Image: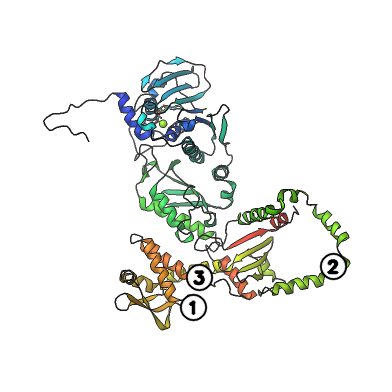
Amino acid sequence: MNKAHRNIRPQIRQLDDACANRIAAGEVVERPASAVKELVENALDAGAARVDATYADGGKTLIRVGDDGHGMAPDDLPLALSRHATSKIDGADLLNIRSFGFRGEALPSLGAVGRLCITSRAAGMEGATITVDGGRLGPLRPEAAQYGTLVELRDLFHATPARLKFMRSDRAEAQAIADVIRRLAMAEPYVSFTLSDLSQDKPRQILRFDAAQGALFDALEERLADIIGRDFTDNALRIDAERDGLRLTGFAGLPTYARGAAVAQYVFVNGRPVRDKLLLGAVRAAYMDLLSRDRHPVVALFIDCAPELVDVNVHPAKAEVRFRDPGSARGLVVSGLRHALAGAGHRASGTLGGAMLGELGKGAGGSMGAGRYQASWPSPGACGAAQALQAPPQMQEAPALWAGAALESARGFRGDVADTPPVETADAPLGAARAQLHENYIIAQTRHGMVIVDQHAAHERLVYEKLKRQRAEANVPAQALLIPEIIELPPLQAAQLLELAEMLASLGLVVEPFGAGAVVVRETPAILGQIDARALIAEIVDDLADLGHSERLEAQIDAVLSRMACHGSVRSGRQMRVEEMNALLREMEATPHSGQCNHGRPTYVELSLPQIEKLFGRR
Ligand SMILES: Nc1ncnc2c1ncn2[C@@H]1O[C@H](COP(=O)(O)OP(=O)(O)O)[C@@H](O)[C@H]1O
Ligand SMILES: [Mg+2]
């Protein structure tokens, strides 16, 4: 820092507008995507029904946004370019903001750091155009223009070369621009959007979202299907909850639809896309015991409230907000999502079957060239006829015998095979158990297809949910070990574990000190049966260390319960009787969250008859 000597008194100066604008631009316009955000928000504030955005070279050389909104009168153009000039608030009430913009900073900031040209025409007025370059305003000129506004920004940051150096690759900037458009398009499903790349001679359309129709929830669903994918809306739950004057709506993906990174979490407050830590933290908390920590849910959530309950004027780019009551905002998100997820019961990602088919298709393609092979499959009818002609006579005569042999050989897998399922189980969502394969997979027949259950994963989830229920009702019932298990641990870890002894005891795990650097386990949760207490303790110690000290007690409890469930589950490799398998299926149907294991993996996949038929080329 260049500190003036105490004897030389520096002079206080009023900075000129151009300089003040450049400073403001530093906050408002961080990169090309922020310029796009400001311009598109202006278009939406002007009531546009369609917004067309274009960029070249990642937005560094050109950004153009056209809209069919209410436009500006010629006299408004120079005013719009001056600092703190806005038509959106009158300055009387900063707590009652209903538009994207209100600070009156975007256009003058953009004009300070690039070459800006605005052309606009309002109803009943002549069109006009004005330019501003590096803060210098050009003359206002009449221009034959369409109704609406076209803003063109060239050579962003040419006036601030330092900032130019911080730009990322064209591709990264282009992706950030697309992300801005996606977020705003989610906020405004009734508006059409396009985004095009003009870097090459021929413009290339990057995004196109046509105006959605219908009631808001349906329109939103249509828009989300366009943006995130039909996969998402097919595997998401509708959220609609209310609390303390805040309303939460939107869609939340099933845990089995989670992603490897938190890239598809969209949150809006009063229609404004935000990246708010409080809200994103609440989303994470809601899914906490449904996903392992490296999986991230996909959500599009909208919080709406009276404008005075939330301050949007916290951040120049308005990416963060401040709720008057942050606790109730967080609580609404956590409870709203949890409630919906619990209601989803055993439902796992419905597209898993499709994904599986895709995989199977690929497998066939490897050696045989699935495409050609498939194309030459005859129709099912032709197949039947051809088979009748070709099949050797003994085969035709002995279908019953053959089926019996199949049954025998299925028994040879050492699984159990059920005969005709009882009527009531055949109609149950997870169907009637027919066989167990490889001592871990239950095959069940449903009314319209089949499901394959990962018995270990399913059982783990059921035990976990039961443990949670027991804990919620009272303490988890424990059973004393015949011979208490003495476990040596590094002194620090032993001490850490014993600090939590009370909490562990409430979870059915009674641990006591046993000299320095050892603990003794006296009781374990009854529901787990005979377990390896030593292995369980070792893993719990690791889990707690992973969580760190700062995590809340609830998180620690969830981690311990989840680890216990893992130990108490039917490990793969256990044979089950048909009644046992059916009991497991029925319990899954009745248990919340049973569609995925504690790590967010599915506990079952479903294949519909049409999917199975497709697999065999019958469709
Ligand atoms: N696309 C547009 N259509 C109509 N009016 C616009 C448009 N863009 C900007 N304006 C006008 O210019 C003003 C200044 O815009 P801006 O600098 O972004 O500030 P703010 O959006 O905070 O009001 C707006 O208040 C609005 O009246
Ligand atoms: Mg604005």
Q: Position of residue 300 (x, y in %)?
A: 49, 47
Question: Is 250 rendered above or below residue 556?
Answer: above
Circle 2 residue: 395
Kind of residue indicated by mark 2: Met
Towards the viewer: 202 or 53: 202
Quadrant that contains the N terminus: top left
Upstream in the sequence, badge 2 or badge 3? 2
Instruction: Determine the image quadrant of residue 447.
Output: bottom right
Kind of residue indicated by mark 3: Val
Q: Is residue 151 visible?
A: yes
Cα gap from disc 2 to disc 1, whole angstroms: 50 Å
Q: How is the image coloured?
A: rainbow
Question: Is 524 rendered above or below residue 113?
Answer: below
Towards the viewer: 427 or 58: 58
Q: Secondary structure at mark 3?
A: helix
Callout 3 crowding tier (Cα within 10 Å): few <14, some 14–19, many ≥20: many
Q: Are marks 3 and 1 in contact (CB under 8 Å)?
A: no
Towards the viewer: 381 or 327: 381
Residue at image point 37% right, 23% down: 134
Q: Position of residue 314 (x, y in %)?
A: 34, 40
Kind of residue indicated by mark 1: Gly
Is 448 on the left-hand or right-hand side of 399?
left
Residue most extreme to the bottom:
482
Q: Of circles 2 and 1, which is in front?
A: 2
Q: Of circles 2 and 3, which is in front?
A: 2
Number of marks in picture = 3
Q: Where in the image, quadrant-wise, is ligand 1 located?
A: top left
Q: Which mark is residue 463?
A: 3
Cα gap from disc 2 to disc 3, whole angstroms: 48 Å
Circle 1 residue: 529
Q: Secondary structure at mark 1?
A: loop
